Amino acid sequence: MLRVIARELLDDDAADSDDGEWRGSLHDLARVNTLLGGRRLMRSELDKLPSVPLSILDVGTGGADMPAVAIDHVRARGAQARCVAVDRSPRILAIARERLGGRSDIRLQIADALALPFADESFDLAMLNLALHHFDGAAAVQVLRELARVARDVIVNDLRRSPIAWAFARFVFPLFTRNRFTLHDGPLSIARSYTPEEARELATAAGWRRIAVRKYPGYRMALVGGRR
């Protein structure tokens, strides 16, 4: 299955839609992370890190469900972590703020993944959840370079491209949601996603010296490592 280059509805902050559609789409993404392995992957990869991360950056945070998962998991291990969760979309960050319900351990901030406004090694961990596939070619390399620049360790949690996964999104998602964004973007996200081999090549091009790619159920994969 060849990778598709296209834009998703959530890529366009000015899309002709009401806030209810955006909220519904981000709610569906959180459900996907819960039911199809995204949260399990994150917890597993956090446990594999050489040390518990106390400062976390989440890039392309969307509804900010995954930074909450990471911080709660770290807390369950007896440590207190804080997270800066960034997204380029003011509209999405406004919804994330509602969903977080005033949590003080996650700070939301507007930022561009291609040019993160943080100094080198500002964080113990940088995360990118369901977002790598939104970047093509040189842009994907630049995002991975920025993640490894600002943090000691990086966890990229994303989809694996597969015709089976595409068919699942195309034909099963309509049984669980009527959200226009989800029904359009779900199958397209699969078609835009990278294979494990392609993800490794992108990390190599970004100058990572530590690279591991692990497959997970639900057609997920973790790309982990860093530049040191």
Image (cartoon, rainbow, N blue to C red):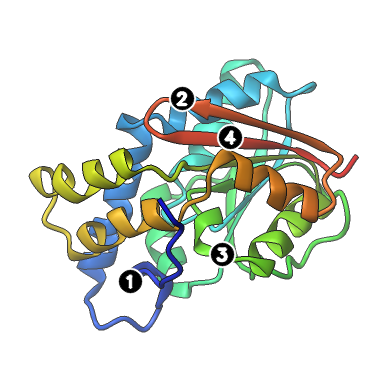
Which quadrant would residue 161 be assigned to in this image? top left
Distance (Cα) linking label 1 and label 2: 27 Å
**Image vertical order of residue 51 relative to residue 203, above or below:** above
Image coordinates for residue 99, horizontal then vertical, percent: 37, 51
Q: Residues within 10 Å of mark 2 (few under 14, many from 20)?
A: some
Query: Residue at coordinates 58% horizontally, 34% vertically from top-left?
Result: 222
Q: Position of residue 35 (x, y in %)?
A: 30, 30
Asked which secondary structure carries label 1, the reply is: helix
Mark 2 or mark 1, which is nearer the start of the sequence?
Answer: 1
Residue 78: x and y in percent read 65, 16
Identify the disc placed on residue 145: none
Three-letter amino acid code of the residue under disc 3: Phe
The residue beneath circle 3 is 135
Mark 1 and mark 4: span between their CA atoms?
A: 25 Å
For mark 3, does the 10 Å Cα neighbourhood hold few (<14), some (14 to 19), or many (20 or more) residues? some
Q: Residue at x 65, y 68 (%)?
A: 139
Q: Quadrant of the C terminus?
A: top right
In the image, is residue 210 above or below residue 181?
A: above
> For mark 2, what is the residue?
40
Provide the residue designation for mark 1.
9
Task: State the separation of the CA atoms marked 2 and 3.
Answer: 24 Å
Residue 101 visible in this rendered orientation of the protein: no
Secondary structure at numbered mark 2? helix
Query: In the depicted view, which residue is nearer to us: 218 or 62?
Result: 218
Residue 140 falls in image quadrant: bottom right
